[in-house]
Structures are given as C-alpha cells and as structure tokens.
Image (tube, rainbow, N blue to C red):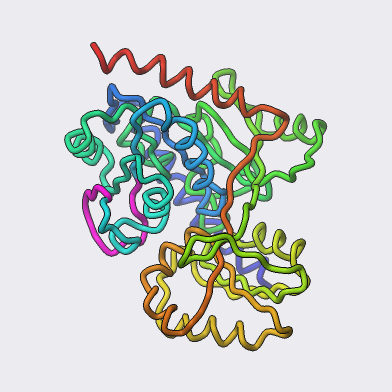
Amino acid sequence: MLKYLKLLLYPFSLLYGLVMWLRNRFYDKGLLTAVEFDIPTIAAGNLSVGGTGKTPHVEYMIRLLKEHYRIATLSRGYNRRTKGYILADENSTAADIGDEPMQFHDKFPDISVCVGEERMLAIPQLLGDEPATQVVLLDDAFQHRSIKPGMNILITDYNRLFTRDHVVPFGRLREGRKGYERANCIIVSKCPPDMSVAEKQALQKEINPLPHQRLFFTTLQYGTLYDMASLQPVTVSHEASVLLACGIARPAPLLQTLQNRFSQVFLLPFPDHYYYSEKDIEKIKKERNDMPGTEKIVITTEKDAVRLHLLRKTLAAQNLQIAVMPVEISFLFDEAELFNNFIFDYVNRSLPAISQ
C-alpha cells in the first residue's frame, strides 16, 4: 500500500523537477544573473535533502586552509531564530546563527563565521567586516545559483547516491540528477572504510564524472567521546548501556558505530536541527534511567551539543551528563593529498586577482 501511495507523489515530483530545470536553464542562459566575486569561493553542498555528511567535509577544508589563508564560512543558518546577516562573535548561540555555523564557531574560533539568507548580499557585508578574508567557504550552497562560486563541491551519500534517487517528494533530490554537471568535484561520502577498488571503479562508471570533474571517496571516522560541559575526555566501558539522543537527518552511521563499541545501545531520535526543551531533557533523563545495567551514559552529536548548550542550566540542575561523539572524514585510496592539492591549486590560481 505504501508503495502505491508513494507513486501518487510522482506527478508532483515531475512538476517540481520541471520548475527547478527551468530555473537552472535561466541561470545557464544568463536570463537570471549570478554574481561572481574576485575572492576565492568554494561551495560545498548536495543534490539531496540533508544527511550526506556535508558538515565534516566543510570542517576538513577549514583545517586544510586556515593555517595558510584568512578564511571565512558563510551559511544560511538553517532554522535559526534570527534573520539577515550576522557575523558570529563571543555572544553568539545556535539560536542566533544556527547549529552548524555555531559548531564551526566553537571549534574554529580563529576563523570568521557568518550567516545570511541572501549570500550575494552577505559576502560584501562579510568583506566589509573582515577585509583581510582571502577564502570564503559557502556551506550548503549548491542550489544557491545567485552566486557563481569559483569551485563547486557536490557531496553524495554512498547509501543513497544521487544517481539512484528522484526529485522530491517522490525521492530526496532538490533538483534533477543533471544538476551534478555544475560540480567541479564530486565526493561520495559515508563509504565503507574497506571499500574495494572494484567497487570504486563500478561507482565511478555509474556516476560518470565529466572531463572537468574530480571524483573522491570518503568515510566517516568517529573520535574520542568528551563531556559536553567540561570538554574533557569520557571513558566508557564496553558493557555500558548507551542512549543515543540526537536530532540529525541520518543517525544510522553513528548508531552502527556505537553498536559496535557497546553491548547495549538505545536510540532516542529527534527531528533534524531540533531545538530541545526542558521537557525533552526530562525525557532524556528518564530514558537513561530506564535503561538496564549500572553503567549508563547519554551520547549525542556535536551538532546537537550546540543546541543542547542553550539548556546548560537545566542540564546542570538535572545532573544529566551528556557525552559528545566527534566525527571527521577520511579520504579512501590514499587520495587525501590529491584532494588537498586540488583545493590549493584552485585557491592559489584565484588569489592573484585579489592583489591586483
């Protein structure tokens, strides 16, 4: 029955896909104007609705570039409680700038982090506030055609490649598959760490990158748990009961990792980008207390932690410890250096325009 109900969505998917195709054609033909900037701009995004692992890829590029250039990130600030352009400062919270920008701001205080719905207006404001900026990383901007970035990086989930997906609402694509042609670089994320060369070649054939495109494969690497309040490492035995409380698009990879590490793991899911309430904290504590065993711990993601931090007084009053699981990406097939050089080559080619 569910299959037939989903088929009813297909006409709406065709209609939405047509609208997006026309919009893209207007930009391609110059009927709608896209603004270019002299400063190197790198856009990281996806064709699908969330869950591709974009944030750790942006963080990878932050780590790569920040020791060599003055960089800034620009995001829309999805689901924030403010509007307009905001440059993050010491008083910013996830409610002000959104969870992902707040995560960047917390982890990389030496870079500029800003948000703005209209990126073509936000970049000049950013450069006015931070004129020494040399590189701008545009977070989740693949469909934001009013800006023409110098480099477009498309990230697609190994478990749901864009080549096998459909436009919303029938599938999860924000636009038709041909949108991939705008990318300079395609990254297949969340791959198995032991992916074979044969599978790599099969996926390369399926994706069929264009001559100007580079294709890379990455996997997720989860780090050492740390306490959300003190930021100190947390040691947990294999026999502990774990409650994974998180509001992210696809918790499955983290859930699987925890199930491999601990004997009993329970999931308490919340909507993506969810702002927790005091009642949610009570619910989390109750779920933790109801778990079996004597050693119990609540684990969440870094993205959730910046939203939970808004309720730090409630967490302290409830005496509820929450551990955070950090995540990074790793390039497969020893291709990290190839990717790094690909990024550096673009930035170095584009930098002279700034000094002229």
- Which residue sits at x=45%, y=37%? 62
Closest to the observer, 176 or 112: 112
Main secondary structure along the magenta-highlighted residues: loop
Is 87 one of the magenta-colored residues?
A: yes
Residue 148 visible in rendering: no
Closest to the observer, 354 or 288: 288
| Residue 29 sits above or below residue 245 on the image | above
- Which residue sits at x=48%, y=86%? 282
- Which residue sits at x=60%, y=42%? 329
- Relative placement, left or right, of 318 versus 114 is right
Residue 287 visible in rendering: yes
The quarter of the image holding the C terminus is top left
Quadrant of res 155: top right
Q: Position of residue 232 (x, y in %)?
A: 53, 61
Is 340 one of the magenta-colored residues?
A: no
- Relative placement, left or right, of 160 versus 82 is right
| Residue 290 sits above or below residue 133 on the image | below
The quarter of the image holding the N terminus is bottom right
Numbered marks: total: 0
Q: Position of residue 29 (x, y in %)?
A: 35, 26
- Which residue sits at x=24%, y=47%? 87
- Give the extent of the magenta segment: 75-88
